[in-house]
Amino acid sequence: MAERDLYLREGLGYLPHLLELVDRNRASSTYGSFDRAYWHYRTSDFPSGMFQECVLPLALAYQLNHPENPFYKVERLKELVIAGIQFAARSSHPDGSCDDYFPYERAAGAATFSLYAATEASLLLGLREPSFVEFFKRRAAYLAHEGFSESGILSNHKALIVLALYNVFLITGDSFFKKTAGEKLAQLLSLQNTEGWFPEYEGCDPGYLTFTIDFLAKYYQKSKDETVLKPLERAVQFSSFFQHPDGSYGGEYGSRNTFHFLPHGFELMGSRFPVALRMADHFLESLEIGKRSYLEDDRIFCHYVYNFLQAYIDYSSRDLVASSHEKQSFTEIFQEAGLVIKNSGTHYGVISLCKGGVAKIFFGKKLVYCDSGLVGQARDGRKFISQVMAKNHSKIEGERIQIEGSCYEYQEILFSHWSFLLFRLFLLIFARFLPANFTRRILQAKAVVRTKKKIPFRYSKQFLFDGAPQVEWKFYLDEPSLQLKSLWIASDATFIYTATSQPFQPGTLQGWFDLSGIVEELNQKRTAVWRKPLS
């Protein structure tokens, strides 16, 4: 199989599942809905607008002429694309917004992803029905007004709004949407950090950065707006440090814990930036050996499906030769992102200074240490974690990286029957009348930007990359009253809500380190040490 065809294989492999999700019954009032929980299982009382993004891979498969594509020019696919856009239009709110997880949520992300997908499908298939055009303009106007004011900074959403607005301009010819896309683009570019990354909530998330790169590269492909090229070059260069030796990418060291890698933007930029081409090639290697992350959730996986197909279509020439980080020895410190990359020649590590030393360490191409922070429980029942975005003291000297951190109380957020009922009543009675971002701010405060309440449990962590490479933990209990019941070093735990966190990636199989052997020593002596060789 040619390397390029790996993209095609990955994308087309999901088409049967997409066709399972959609309501294909023309007599049904939900014909064209891809939210199977809503139209089939009836476990939801409203349709999530995010699912209508699924029209785009169907449109791409319909148009893609390849002997291995059994969906090429199958009219049933085109019918379902049209039905999907029609359902998106009639299930949206009068202002053009839609919901994602809760009724009257008016989620900017769901509105943006589904608008981009619907407009891109319309451009591909030449769909210009007046009802579609009216719907696109209504939703685009909503996003132009409300999309950039959503609570929390999500640069990838902002980049996609720019792209979706430009698509609406291409369909309608209305210069308002082109002008607004340019204005929103300027706002987005002003957010780029000098290190090259765009912010996601509390900081830098390399995974979601590939979304932003992808959307800006698509925008450039359509608009030829050269103002995005320098920002794209800086973003691609920064992202290159987070592609691991085995081809995997990202992880819990990012602000949103994601492993995303969208290859299409890198293919589009490959002719301009050799490092983008190298990253795309390395990602193709990960596809071949099964090292990419797998996010198969029905609500999310579609992001990847159409991206794989687009990457196949826009596969870049491989005439350029790019340098590789893997053949060099270096220490790269991104102070503002709070991330350190250490390449010793034998080991490649990514370490988060601002999340208390969360890290992935590779020996050659083998992941030998996967650390997403401490998880434990005190004898009084309190649960605690260390994976929190905070300002930690750190020191980097030669082959030694040291981080000091604290532990914080952890409280799970789960609905009971009664709390869910009360929340749903609030949404149904009040949320429809509240400002667009009010409900989201409540959810964000509870699940994303959490209160950081320290407990009297500190640690220092040292990564040693010379001699016999190892990681060494030292633990300190600062109050006599605090007694521990259990303690682990997690390999894949996350503690803020991100819809796309917790995918499957081969590193998930690393397992947690059980520190029960030192808990009693720590309770009695108030300090203990734990070491792990990095080989």
Image (cartoon, rainbow, N blue to C red):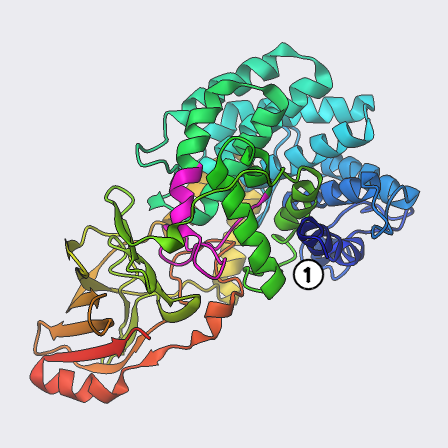
* Residue 262 in view: yes
Considering the whole magenta stretch, tell me its main secondary structure: loop
Q: Quadrant of the N terminus?
A: bottom right
| Image location of residue 38, percent across then percent down | 72, 54
Q: Amino acid at mark 1?
A: Thr
* Residue 152 in view: no
| Image location of residue 491, percent across then percent down | 38, 70
The residue at the point 14 percent across, 87 percent down is: 521
Q: Secondary structure at mark 1?
A: loop
Q: Compared with residue 374, is residue 258 higher up or lower down, i.e. above or below? A: above
Q: Is residue 250 magenta?
A: yes
The residue at the point 81 percent across, 21 percent down is: 130
Mark 1: few/some/many CA within 10 Å (<14, 14-19, 20+) = few
**Number of numbered callouts drawn:** 1
The residue at the point 71 percent across, 34 percent down is: 118
Mark 1 sits on what residue?
43
Q: Quadrant of the C terminus?
A: bottom left
Residue 268: image quadrant is top right
Residue span colored magenta:
236-263
The answer to whether residue 483 is left or right of residue 316 is left
The residue at the point 33 percent across, 44 percent down is: 203
Q: Compared with residue 461, is residue 380 higher up or lower down, i.e. above or below? A: below
Q: Compared with residue 11, is residue 217 higher up or lower down, i.e. above or below? A: above
